[in-house]
Amino acid sequence: GSSGKEGKGWKKFQSYKGEGALPDEVERLRIFVDRKAQSVILPIHGFAVPFHINTIKNASKSDEGDFTYLRINFQTPGQLAGKKEDTPFEDPDATFIRSVSYRSPDGHRFDNLVKQITDLKKEANKREQQKKEMAD
Amino acid sequence: MTSQFDKIYYGLSPEVGKFRVAASGMGWKGTESNNTVTLEASKIKWAQWIRVARHFQLRVGLADHSKQKFDGFLREEHDKIASLLKNHFAITLETQEVSFKGWNWGVADFRGQDLAFLVSDKTSFELPLNNVANSNIAGRTEVSLEFANLAGSSKGKIAGDEMVEIRFHVPGNVSKIKDSDAGSA
């Protein structure tokens, strides 16, 4: 988007500067929460794909038969923002990943991942809130 | 003369194997299964070097327009691979840039049998469309892709966590994706 209106209020963030900064754990092709980089790294068909916590809305888990499903919802335009003000986007006209779902026979690990992602999100929200209060 | 690389994976397989390059071509052999993959020198057309989860991937394009992927090469092995390919098959190893920005927005780009998701003009990941079991359009701006489980796996035999669905928000662009060969519901 090139119009001046788009991207207004969006603050730049980035998970990693380059491939050398990826944690060794990605090699296992498992979802990994990197607290230091404020990111969740997802294995997507062999790629290690980081998502900064700012892009994540929430994570949830459900059990079906022998498997546990983990779903991560992302921030995208066109969602009801509730009572919060609209989230600013760098390019609202881009294609966005809205959600991803994984399955595993190991429900305990997915439980733990949901907790880690939820905690990371809480910390990020808290920091954001503190910044706002400082600015007021 | 044959050069060998250890701890190389063929595609997304969980099994490691040995990868060999010689004037006659390239080959992979699984350590446990003894399965082999061979690529004849005369069929090798191009090669790419891409950072993936299991270190670097060597992607080889063949004369029949198929491609083969081998994961597990180390950063330091780039120059050795590049010179082997140059000397034996007269092809240049091209590096495909990958994004690690952590953004969930970009451009969906159809490249043959793959849907590539690009962030700031760099590849973030690729989805093989022939693994799409089902696709749906929900509302005017949402597209979902469901994946068939790769190894027909019950338990254990997949490498890592298995993505079963991805949903995209595509502002005003849904018809573009629908008209492609992404498979339909």
Image (cartoon, rainbow, N blue to C red):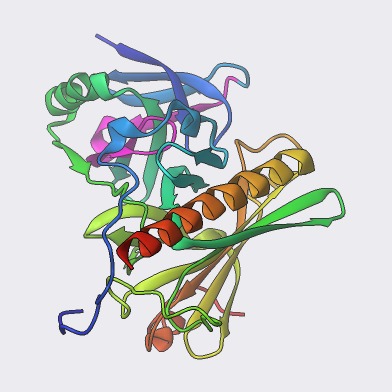
Q: Is residue B124 magenta?
A: no
- Against B42, is A56 above or below? below
Q: Is residue A49 left or right of residue B121?
A: right
Q: Is residue B51 magenta?
A: yes
Residue A133's quadrant in the figure?
A: bottom left
Q: How many marks?
A: 0
Q: Position of residue A5 (x, y in %)?
A: 21, 85
- Against A16, is B39 above or below? above
Q: Residue furthest right?
A: A65
Q: Which of B55 and B34 is in front in this view?
A: B55
Q: What stretch is highlighted in magenta?
A: B34-59
Q: Where is residue B82 in the image (x, y as percent from the top left)?
A: 17, 27
* Residue at position x 20%, y 18% in the image: B80
Residue A113's quadrant in the figure?
A: top right
- Against A7, is A116 above or below? above
Residue A116 visible (yes or no): yes
Q: Nearer the viewer, residue B62 or A29?
A: A29
Q: Which of B26 and A48 is in front in this view?
A: A48
Residue B165's quadrant in the figure?
A: bottom right
- Against B146, is B10 above or below? above
- Quadrant housing the N terminus of chain A: bottom left
* Residue at position x 29%, y 30% in the image: A20
* Residue at position x 83%, y 57% in the image: A64
Residue B104 visible (yes or no): no
- Quadrant housing the C terminus of chain A: bottom left
- The secondary structure that dominates the magenta segment is strand
Q: Where is residue B2 in the image (x, y as percent from the top left)?
A: 29, 11
* Residue at position x 30%, y 36% in the image: A19
Q: Where is residue A96 in the image (x, y as percent from the top left)?
A: 41, 70
